[in-house]
Each structure stands twice: as structure tokens, then as C-alpha cells.
Image (cartoon, rainbow, N blue to C red):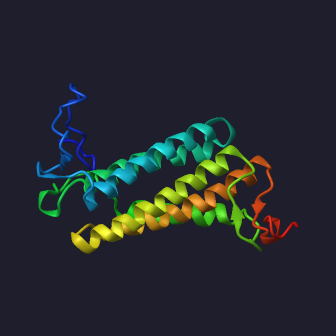
Amino acid sequence: MSDAKFEAPRIALNRIYTKTGDRGETHLAGGQRVAKDSARIACYGTVDELNAFVGMAALSARESVPGLATILRRVQHELFNLGSILATRPEDVHPRQARITDAEIRQLEIEIDRMNADLAPLRSFVLPGGSRLNTELHVCRTVCRRAERLAITLDREETIPPETIQYLNRLSDAFFVWSRWANHSLGVKEVLWEPNQSASGTT
């Protein structure tokens, strides 16, 4: 038996389309059929969307900010672990099923504090910009916030582990710090919000 904390995946993706979802339903990890627009599917579908954007940001960071790329790759695995638990009703969760734990939340807090210490205090809100990596991380932040809102909605209807919402909340904060830290590492000035740069403010 492996000493790994979580079980390795036991899947075989031989057929990509099954036609079983043609009537607007899909199945959870426990085999239950649910509507594709149910709160649970909307939540872990958005986590999957977030994972795709994180992959894009990790690719952008690979050459310019390799340390951040490594963190983002880890986050991708964590998001898949999160999706695993969200795709499973509480009664069907296995003891060694992949999930989010306090360790993932603590690690994000360590990274937030460490990188934020390198940054100048903000005197205005920041806008996405300055570098491609910065803007991609802001996209990750906003999608993560949406996933968090959907997790809160789901938690009102069905029980989900509290670490789910805590992780998404902390991760969105991390994306904000990482976006600033990316520009800092690249030597790029932040784009600050200036209310009078609007059409009415410049005429």
C-alpha cells in the first residue's frame, strides 16, 4: 500500500463522448445523475475554468518568473483535488480521496505574506495591466472569486467541506498579491486607478 496521503486516480478515458449528457445531465463521482446547471456542477465547473487560466499564467511565468510558475503548477493540482471533492456528495467521499486540507491554506498564507513583504504599500486600487502575466493573474483572481461565490451558494444547499471556501478565499487573495509581485519581479510599474482618467474627467 502506498504511503501517499491521497489515492492515485483510477480512471480510464478511452471514450471522450458518451452521449449520456445530451439531455442536460451528468453524473457525480458517486454515480448520481444531476442537471448540468445544478449548483454543484456550476461550482466545480468554475474551478475547472480557473484551472485552465492558471495553466495559462503558469506558462507565461515559466521563463520570466520561474518561482511563481512552480507555485502555479502546484495550485493546478490543488484545484483538481478541490474539484474531486466538489464532484462528490459527502456520503460518497472516501477516506483517501483527494481534497483540500489546512496544509494548502497555510501554504498560501505563507506565500502571500512572503511576497507581499516585497511590495510597496498601495495608495490606490490597481488595474490589471503592465504585463501579460499580471493581467492573466487578475483573470485568475476574478474567476476564483466567482468560484468562491458559487461554493457559498452550494454550501447553502448541500454540505461541502469548510476548507473549500477557505481555500478559494485565500487563493483569490494570493492571485492579487501574485499579480502585483509579477510586475515587481519584471520591473514593470503598476497601473493605478485614477478616477479622472475617465471620459468625463479628461474633458
User: Closest to the observer: 71 or 59?
Assistant: 59
Q: In this view, does 175 lie to the left or right of 158?
A: right
Q: Quadrant of residue 103?
A: bottom left
Residue 83 vertical placement versus 125 (above, below): above
Q: Is residue 62 left or right of residue 152?
A: right
Residue for point 62% across, 61% down: 177
* Quarter the C terminus occupies: bottom right
* Quarter the N terminus occupies: top left
Residue 105 visible at all: no
Task: Return the residue found at the far top.
Answer: 14
Residue 103 vertical placement versus 185 (above, below): below
Q: Is residue 126 left or right of residue 136?
A: right
Residue for point 46% across, 67% down: 169
Q: Quadrant of residue 176?
A: bottom right
Q: Where residue 109 sits: x, y (%)?
A: 52, 66
Q: In this view, does 111 lie to the left or right of 89?
A: right
